[in-house]
Structures are given as structure tokens and as C-alpha cells.
Amino acid sequence: MTIDKTSRENMVLEAIVRMHVKTAIPVGSKHIAEMLGLSSATIRNVMLDLEKEGFLKQPYTSAGRIPTDLGYRRYVDNMHSFEESPIPALDSQIIHYLQKKKLFEEIIEATSHAISQITHYTGIALSPKNKLYFDGTYHMLEQPEFSELSMSRDFLKIIEERDDLMNLMSMNLDGEGTVIRIGRENIFDELRECTTITTVYKFKDHISGNIGVIGPMRMKYEKVVPIVESFAEVMNDMLEGI
């Protein structure tokens, strides 16, 4: 069976993304060739094309390649499915922890904490009072990408100043659904190496705020997106009971 150029590029890019997410190091053609059962020469040619098109980059000479923000965007856009119903499979204590909260703001704050606990990224939540909650900042500083002082400094800056982050969180309150902003799709330079995933929650059938995560671009999107969406559903149910 003949595979067209675009399909082959998508197949190779997906393999590179998955390996880079797992290892956090540049990916060489040999490993991808072994994964896909293709020759190293074929993989090298595809990787070169992907690099020329801006989907991969070589962080330093003689290294393998890593996905760019454009590469992650292409991967996410071509993802066939997300994992289904992740919350029930997780520790029920998390859900019980949320259900013990009775006040509106307590529920929102607890949700940012719970999201961080499960994803191991920074959980964020915006309340109707335009108050921003976030939890798990240290999770980002544990990521290999943020071992560079400039990157960790930029991330801490936008977290501490809050106003820019609050503006970012407010941007999708006029529509439903999940918004994934990868790298330079985030409007602030401090988040150029990050991905933000946010989704809205409702109170009495009206959009009231949103919740989500800030993580590195190198994340398991197929897992994190449904986690955020499931928490929004849990919040909707809990807020209706207030």
C-alpha cells in the first residue's frame, strides 16, 4: 500500500511526539525507524521535510529532533481521539475531596488543586468574581524544559503578576468548548514554551468561568484534555447543587 507524503509525515511526527513526551530528549531517526518498521534513510528524509516545514527543530548540532509548537499543533489537530472518561478511573478520593466543598469559591479553588494533583501540571481556575486560582506551580519547575533559568523565570513572572494570565483565561468566556493554545499561540512571550488548556464551566446554564492547566508543550494531550473537560462536568454538577 502506498502512503502519501502527508500521511507519512503525520505518522512520523506522531511517533516523534510520543517518544519526546516520554523521554524529554531529542529523537533520532533510528528509533523512529524501529518503531514504524521503515528504513532509517526514509525516516531521515521525512524528518528533514518536517524540519524545513517548521514542525521539527534540532536543538543542537548532532542531536535528534524535537517538535516545535507548530509540530504539536499539527499533532493535536490530527489526533483521532482522546482517552475516554478518565475521571472514574482515577482515585475516587479526588472527587470526594471536591464534593466536601460547599461554597462556590471553595469549589473553584479546590478544582484547580485537584487538576494539578492529577495532571502534575499547574492547575488554574477563573471564578465569576474574576478571581484567579492556581495550584502546583512547582510541577512546571520539575519539567526538564524549565531547568533553564530564563524559562523558569518567565513562567514565575506571569504566574506572580496574574493580570496577563487572567486576561488569557478570560479570552474564551464568550464561547463553549475547550481551547488549546500551544507555544506561540499564547499571546504572552512568557508562555512561549508552554501549552494552556482551558474549558468553561457553567452555573445555572450560563458560562461563569473556566478551568484548565498550564503545562509544557511536551504533554500527553490525549490524556490531559479529557481530564480538564471531565472536571468541568463535575463542577457543573456540583455548582447546580448550591
Image: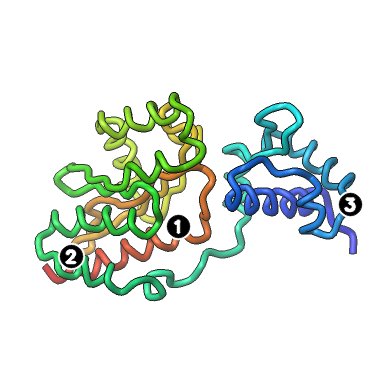
The numbered disc on residue 39 is 3
**Amino acid type assigned to the residue bearing label 3 in the image:** Ser
Write the residue at 43% across / 33% down: 191
Q: Which mark, residue 187?
A: none
- Image coords of residue 141 (percent x, y): 40, 39
User: For mark 3, does the 10 Å Cα neighbourhood hold few (<14), some (14 to 19), or many (20 or more) residues?
Assistant: few
Structural distance between the alpha carbons of marks 2 and 3: 55 Å
Give above or below for 29 relative to 52: below
Please identify, in this view, whether the residue under mark 2 or under mark 3 is nearer the observer. Answer: 3
Task: Specify the quadrant that holds the N terminus.
Answer: bottom right
The residue at the point 29 percent across, 51 percent down is: 210
Q: Mark 2 points at which residue?
A: 239
Query: How did the renderer colour the structure?
Result: rainbow
Residue assigned mark 1: 224
Q: Percent position (x, y) of residue 174?
A: 31, 47
At horizontal 48% and vertical 71% (from top left) the residue drawn is: 84
Q: Is residue 205 left or right of residue 221?
A: left
Tell me the amino acid under the disc marked 2: Leu
Dot 1 or dot 2: first in sequence order is 1
